[in-house]
Image: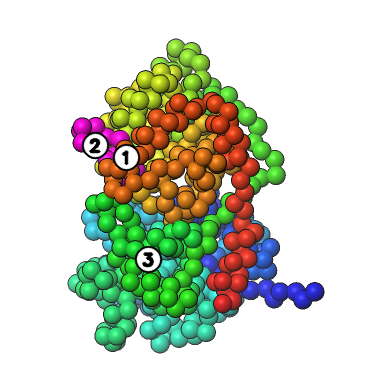
Amino acid sequence: MKTEHRIRVLMVAAENGALPAAKVGGMGDVLRDLAPELAKAQVQADQIMPAYGRFHRHPHASQLARLTVPFGGRHEIVTLYQLANPAHPESRLFLLDHPLFSNAGDGVIYHCNDPEPYASDASKFALFCAAVAVALCQRHLSRPEVLHLHDWHAALLTVLRAFDPRYQPLQALRCVYSIHNLAHQGTRPFRNSHSSFGRWFPELAASLTDAQTRRIEDPSYPQCLNPMRAAINLADKVHLVSPSYASEVLQPSDHRHGIWGGEGLEQDLNRRHQQGGLCGILNGLVYPDTPAPPQSFEALLNAMHTTLLGWQGHGTHLRNVDFIAHTRLQLWQQAKRPPPSMLLTTVARLTEQKVAILCHRLDNGDTVLETLLRRFKQRQPQGLYVCLGSGNHTIEAELQRVAAHHDNFLFLNGYQEQLSAQLYRQGQLFMMPSSFEPCGISQLMAMREGQPCLVHAVGGLRDTVVDNQTGYWFEGDSLEQQGLALLARFDELLEAFGSDDWQRVAANAKEQRFGWQSPCRLYRHSLYLE
C-alpha cells in the first residue's frame, strides 16, 4: 500500500490554545487541536504567533534568531523563539517578540478600547506578518510546502507575498486562507494615519499599481486597505469553517433584517467559488477517552463564587456587575435552595453576532431576553439562566441591567476555562441564538456533555444541530421574527422539559461525534494538495 508523503505546513494565527491564556475565541481552540489531528493525516503543522510580551517566557522556549524587519520606514528587531508545541510535541510552536506585540499589555491579545477600529491591532499584526515573511525568506524557519493563514490578522502576508519583491520566494509556497469570522476584516486607511498601509510599508505602498490596489482595497471605502479581501483575492485557496457558512457568505448582508452574509465581500467570494477556489470544511472537536466525573450544583456555585473572587484580584474597585452576581450567589447559598429545577446556560463572547437577537427590543418595548426570563419564571419558578461571557461594553451593560432586575438570570462578566466546562456539563439547555455562526464550538462542547442546544439555524449551527433530533432550531427573516421565533420555541421547550422526547434529544446530542479525522483529510486533499 502506497504511503502518503508528509506535507509540511506553517500555520500563522493570532491565537493558540496550546498555551495557557493564549486564546480568546474558537480560533484558538482550533489551532490547539489541529497540530496533533493533522499529524494523523500525514501533515506536520508547525505554528507561529506573536508572543504578546508574555508567551516567549515559557520555560521551554528558546531563542532561535533576531530578525531585522523592514517596517514603518525603519528596521525593527523582532526576536524569534521556538518550543515544542505543548499540544503536540512532534511539531513546533514559534513565537515572535517585539514591544508592539504587547501594546495592549503583557499577555493581552487584542486591543479592545481603540478609538479607531483596529488601529492598534492592525499595526501589531502588520509587523507580525512582515516578521513571518522575513523569518521564512531568511530560512530561520524550516521551509514549509504550505502557508496556512488564519483570519485578518495573518492576511497581510498574502500582500507581501504577491507584491513585495523582497518576499518573492514566498510565491513558491502554496497559500491557504481560513476565514473564521468574516465580520472582522481589519480595514485601515492606505495612508494619512499612524496605523495605515503607507505607514507600515511605505516603499510597497508607493509602488502599487492601480490593478494591484483594486485587489486589496475595501469595496465600500476605496481609500482603505481591507486585509481580508486581499487574502480572499490573493491566496491559492479560501476556506470557511462550515459548509453552510461557505454558502451564506455568497449572499449580501442585510443587518437591518437580521441577515449576515458576505459583509461586503460577497462578490469576491462568489468569484473564488466559481473558480473552485473556495470550500467549506466543518471544524472538529476532541472527545476525551473518559468522561469527566459528575459534579454537584453546590460545586458549580462554589466555582462561580471562586471565579468572581479571582476577577477581583485584578482590579482596584468592585465592579457593579460582579456585585450583582455575588449577591445573587449569596442569596442562593444562604437560603440553602435546592438545585435549579431547570438550568439554562450560555458561554459566549459578547458581540452583536452572539446576542443581537436576545437584546432586540420587541414592539412592546421589552427585549427578547427580558421576555424569555419572565416566561421562564412563570413555568420554572426555581429555574436559573447562567451566562458567562465578556466583550462589547454596551452589551455587557445591557446584560448587567437585566441581571439586576431578574433574579433568575446570573450574569458572570468574564471568562474562566474550568467554569465554562462545568456549565457545559451541568446545563440542561444551552442557548446559542447567534445571528450568524461560521462554525461554533460552544454547541459542540455542550452536546458532548449531553446538553441539548437551542440555536438559530445558521452556519455551523445548522450543520451540527439536527432539529428535534439532537437539539432545537428557530428561524426568521428579520430580527423581530427571529426574536419571536426564539420565544415561541422556548415556550415549546418549557412544556417538553423532562419528557421522554426531551431525554431522547439529550441522549442523541451526547452520542454525536464531530471529530477531526474527516476534516483533516479534507484539509490535506482539498486545501493543501488541490
Residue 362: which numbered mark, if any? 2
Q: Which residue does the image show at 43% across and 59% down from the upper left?
A: 245
Q: Which residues are magenta?
A: 354-368
Q: Which amino acid type is shown beneath numbered disc 3?
A: Leu
In the visual, does 411 lie left or right of 148? left
Residue 483: which numbered mark, if any? 1
Residue 437 position (above or below residue 274): above
Q: Is residue 298 visible?
A: yes
Viewer-closest of 516 and 36: 516
Q: Which amino acid type is shown beneath numbered disc 2?
A: Leu
Badge 2 crowding class, 10 Å Cα cut-off, few under 14, some 14 to 19, many 20 or more, is some
Contact check, label 2 and label 1, Cβ < 8 Å: yes
Q: Is residue 363 magenta?
A: yes
Q: Which residue is mark 3?
A: 250
Place of residue 307 in the rendered image (x, y in percent of width and height, measured from the top left) = 46, 32
In the visual, does 74 lie left or right of 290? left
